[in-house]
Amino acid sequence: MPKLKGKTSKTLFVCQECGQQSVKWLGRCPGCEAWNTLVEEVVEPFNSSVERAAEHIAPTPLSEVALEDTPRTPTGLGELDRVLGGGLVPGSVTLVGGEPGIGKSTLLLSAAGRLAESGRTVLYVTGEESLRQTKLRATRLGLSGSRVSLLAHTGLEAIVEAIRQARPDAVIVDSVQVIETADLTSAPGSVAQVRACAHALTRLTKETHGALFLVGHVTKEGYLAGPKVLEHLVDTVLHFDGEPASGFRLLRSTKNRFGATHELGVFHMTAEGLVEVSNPSELFLSDRTDPQPGTMVTVTLEGSRPLLVEVQALTSPAGIGLPRRRTTGVDFNRLSMLLAVLERRVGLQALAQQDVFVSSLGGVQLLEPGADLGVALAIASSVKERPTQRRDAAVGEVGLTGEVRPVGNLLQRLHEARRLGFERCFVAAQRAPLAVEGLDIIAVRHLREAVQRAIG
């Protein structure tokens, strides 16, 4: 970006693909000929004092950098603290993304109330709702007497001034899509407005050493004015999702500069707000009392938390045309591979003419290979019409030759299965034998052996 020696800023349109600049907006970039890639940018005037100050900045040797424990402030919500890595870090910026209406405002307003109860100062900026609407939600959550400060405004300059005057410990901006700055002429919610406002709020947060939450709505494409535009600007990215027909909400971390990623927090949406679920494994298991064909329990790992999830499979003779394969919560490509292995390596030839439907309960995404053995045994149980034992679980990765491979953190998964009352667990054969008191560990080397021992 060229530096201008004037006293006023200048607006240019820059292509996000090739960097081509234009003084006016164009639908098609003249450089790379891509459509709808020009974004409004503000070129700040040249400042010689900043350049002179930058000349005196010296780098610091890595050996002289001091390591200190990062202080954290608990939010009062244990599941949120788990996903954040233990609590809020001063100067951190967290982006909470999710579809509209999923419960992002309810989650953050609950956290704001807990922080205020602990003596922290919190500023809640609502740009989509009025103060009265926010008060009604707070009353429903039992926070009507909370000391949380509210600000209903969409102007970036007014929000920045309020933060400088109050200097709160935590700021919640709901949502960043409606915040606008007077320096840009584009409409609120555009890529330029969202990025400029987020950058200004992030820079202010680093100066005041507070904690900032930005709420970002995910569109159908997931890109325009959504979290993808802001992920590189923030320290932590959280995704809040769940099945619309279910009351369960899952909070996942996909980026965290101050903790582990891919952690999972589980909440239950009730009439009084979000309720933390401290033992989510019990929610993802059905209440069946009698063994049923086509079911198997596997132990997946979400971050550092083991979860027991029931896998259900249904097979039926296909009609005219190709057999159908449908999945919910299970990777479709992994299912196709497992069906081929069951047909060629185990001998279940009937699968070639069967419709196959596989689902995981509770909306949990079984994306890791460690769930292969549980999915395969559920399908085999449905094909043979023979139920598995009610207190059986299976953990293992299945290869193309049918061999069962070990997975990571197996002992932690086995202890979780035993804690929930499971009696047997099928795992891959290990070099060193495993032992968990009260749990019968069945080591198998091939999927054929696992099918024979699980369903006969």
Image (cartoon, helix red, strand yellow):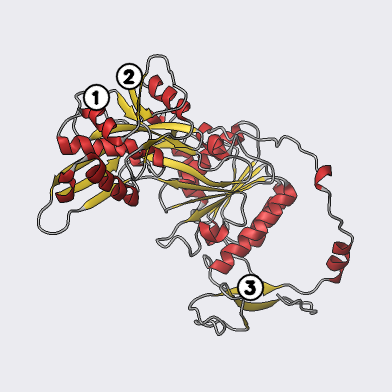
* Disc 2: CA contacts within 10 A as few (<14), some (14-19) or many (>=20): some
Q: Is residue 15 above or below residue 275?
A: below
* Disc 1: CA contacts within 10 A as few (<14), some (14-19) or many (>=20): some
Gap in angstroms between the C-alphas marked 3 and 2: 62 Å
Gap in angstroms between the C-alphas marked 1 and 3: 62 Å
Residue pushed farthest top? Answer: 437
Q: Which residue is mark 2?
A: 423
The answer to which of marks 3 and 2 sits earlier in the sequence is 3
Q: Which residue is mark 1?
A: 389
Observer-side mark, 1 or 3, equals 1
Spot occupied by residue 452 in the image (x, y as percentages of width and height): 23, 29
Secondary structure beneath dot 3 equals strand
The answer to which of marks 1 and 3 sits earlier in the sequence is 3
Q: Is residue 181 above or below residue 390?
A: below
Secondary structure beneath dot 1 equals loop
Q: Which residue is mark 3?
A: 41
The amino acid on which the numbered mark 2 sits, given as a three-letter code, is Glu
Pick the residue in front: 242 or 377.
Answer: 377
